[in-house]
Image (cartoon, helix red, strand yellow):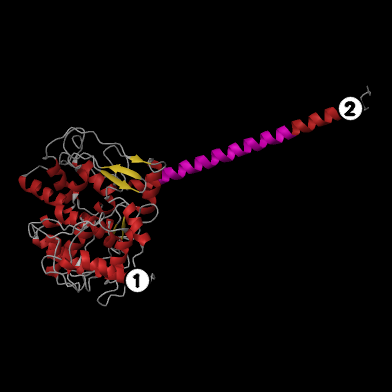
């Protein structure tokens, strides 16, 4: 064989030296990368520590628990009705106030807690703890609560009202039921993520009376903006589930496929032009010649507003009537096909006219008028589709114990027929609203109600 070339050992030594130098450079790069990673992690932890501190909002001064006098307990029961607390904190078919009801969100399911005085519920809680939950959104152990519990609104509740609610909850039957763990996806199931959310979207606050307004108006503002948490539904939420502006401007209710219409827009649900008495009647009964409460709002009337005192209903009406008007929503651009309108007219004549009238005139006290009804012509058509598919049922209230409802047509009408009849309604009797497409109907059918 051929002898090795001269200088080969030197070449080998040079190659080895280069490898060691390269390895050293790589090792140094790894060390620098690790250092940078540790530094970034430290900064992140420090930043989130600041977020935790910022989201704390302080700790309330300790005070003795209120004496549960009959008057205080009765007042607390009334206030929990005004806040509609039992609707979430009682599972369907479950014991009152024992929690367990799942509240579906785009991030997973949050389960309402046990509010009964059993040790598995609020048994060990003090009035200070309860106030901290309402005002600061923190549990007894300091853990941050998820805003499915609307402390973003309850933070406005006064300490006196919180104490009354606490006194009432101490008197309800104790139920041994451990709280169901939340079923949220990562990272939404972490306190770090919740701290970041709170730093962005929550500050503890109080309801500040407007000295330029009447006592009645200010009481209505307190009930609507705070205890009643109306904008929890009637405002738009961003991608992180926050209502950045609590302006009652309307929004889709997450996971329910219902639209809570704007209470500021004249062509949606503004009541600025209604007499105060009509607004109060609607809150008390769920029905007036002008409108009926359906879907989630029917539940609010059933469990909450029908039980309020006439003075509070009037105060809410005065406030709602004063909501500053917002510009009308942009109309839907989808044009209605003459063939679809013709088909919709046939569907209406066969299934709808016997109750709502050939000209959409309705029957006073029974079936709502459709001609000129802004619920028919709103740009957002989600509620129309929901009512046709699933039916429309006003609440049974003391003032309207036997309301007329609308049966569901989910099994009788196809997506094309629902699309056609709603498009017909939105173009008949002088209406100039856009069409409802089959895709609109199909999407609504696919969403859970």
Query: In which quadrant of the rendered view does residue 415 lie?
Result: bottom left
The answer to if 327 sits in the magenta stretch is no
Q: Which residues are magenta?
A: 22-51
Residue 49 visible in the current orientation: yes
State the residue at coordinates (45%, 45%).
47
Give the vertical position of 103 relative to 388 (above or below).
above
Residue 416 falls in image quadrant: bottom left
Give whichever of 434, 129 is nearer the camera: 434
Q: Is residue 31 magenta?
A: yes
Secondary structure beneath label 2: helix
Residue 266 is marked as: none
| Count of number-bearing discs | 2
Q: Residue at x 26, y 68 (%)?
A: 346
Tell me if residue 285 comes above or below residue 12 in the rendering. below
Image position of 350 with respect to 157: above or below: below
Q: Which of 103/203 is in front?
A: 103
Which of 74 and 57 lies nearest the eye of the viewer? 74
Q: Residue at x 71, y 36 (%)?
A: 25
Q: Could you tell me residue 372's position as x and y percent? A: 22, 74
Where does residue 337 sit, x and y in percent of width and height? 36, 71
> What secondary structure prevails in the magenta region?
helix
Indicate the position of residue 252 as horizontal and vertical percent values. Answer: 32, 58
Instruction: Give whichever of discs 1 and 2 has the lower sequence position.
Output: 2
Q: How many neighbours does mark 2 have within 10 angstroms: few (below 14), some (14-19), or many (20 or more)?
A: few
Q: Is residue 380 left or right of residue 295?
A: right
164 relative to 426 in the view: left or right: left
Q: For the residue labelled by badge 1, is the local secondary structure a helix, a strand or a loop?
A: helix
Q: Which residue is mark 2?
A: 8
Horizontal side, residue 180 vs residue 440: left or right: left
> On residue 339, which mark appears?
1
Note whether residue 210 is visible.
no
């Amino acid at each position: 064989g051929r002898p090795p070339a001269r200088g080969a050992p030197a070449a080998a030594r040079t190659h080895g030296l280069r490898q060691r130098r390269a390895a050293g450079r790589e090792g140094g790069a790894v060390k620098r990368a690790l250092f940078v990673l540790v530094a970034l992690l430290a900064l992140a932890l420090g930043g989130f520590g600041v977020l935790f501190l910022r989201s704390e909002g302080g700790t309330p001064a300790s005070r003795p628990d209120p004496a549960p006098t009959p008057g205080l307990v009765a007042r607390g029961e009334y206030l929990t009705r005004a806040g509609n607390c039992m609707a979430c904190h009682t599972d369907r078919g479950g014991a009152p106030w024992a929690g367990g009801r799942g509240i579906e969100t785009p991030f997973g399911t949050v389960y309402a807690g046990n509010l009964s005085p059993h040790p598995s519920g609020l048994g060990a809680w003090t009035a200070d703890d309860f106030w901290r939950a309402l005002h600061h959104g923190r549990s007894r152990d300091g853990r941050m609560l998820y805003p499915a519990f609307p402390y973003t609104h309850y933070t406005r509740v006064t300490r006196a009202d919180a104490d009354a609610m606490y006194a009432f909850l101490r008197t309800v039957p104790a139920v041994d039921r451990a709280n169901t763990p939340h079923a949220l996806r990562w990272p939404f199931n972490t306190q770090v993520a919740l701290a970041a959310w709170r730093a962005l979207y929550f500050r503890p606050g109080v309801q500040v009376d407007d000295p330029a307004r009447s006592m009645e108006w200010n009481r209505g503002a307190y009930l609507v903006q705070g205890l009643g948490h109306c904008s929890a539904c009637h405002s738009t939420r961003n991608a992180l589930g926050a209502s950045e502006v609590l302006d009652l401007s309307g929004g889709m209710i997450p996971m329910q496929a219902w639209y809570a219409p704007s209470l500021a827009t004249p062509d949606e649900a503004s009541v600025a032009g209604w007499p105060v008495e009509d607004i109060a009647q609607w809150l008390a009964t769920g029905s007036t010649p002008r409108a009926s409460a359906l879907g989630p709002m029917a539940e609010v009337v059933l469990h909450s507003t029908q039980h309020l005192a006439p003075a509070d209903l009037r105060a809410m009406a005065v406030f709602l009537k004063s909501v500053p008007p917002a510009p009308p929503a942009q109309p839907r651009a989808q044009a209605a096909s003459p063939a679809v309108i013709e088909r919709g007219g046939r569907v209406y004549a066969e299934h709808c006219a016997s109750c709502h009238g050939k000209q959409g005139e309705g029957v006073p006290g029974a079936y709502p008028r459709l001609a000129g009804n802004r619920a028919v012509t709103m740009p957002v058509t989600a509620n129309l589709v929901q009512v046709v598919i699933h039916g429309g049922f006003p609440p049974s209230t003391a003032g309207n114990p036997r309301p007329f409802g609308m049966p569901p047509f989910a099994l009788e009408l196809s997506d094309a027929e629902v699309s056609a009849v709603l498009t017909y309604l939105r173009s008949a009797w002088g209406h100039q609203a856009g069409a409802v497409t089959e895709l609109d109907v199909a999407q609504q059918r696919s969403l859970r109600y």
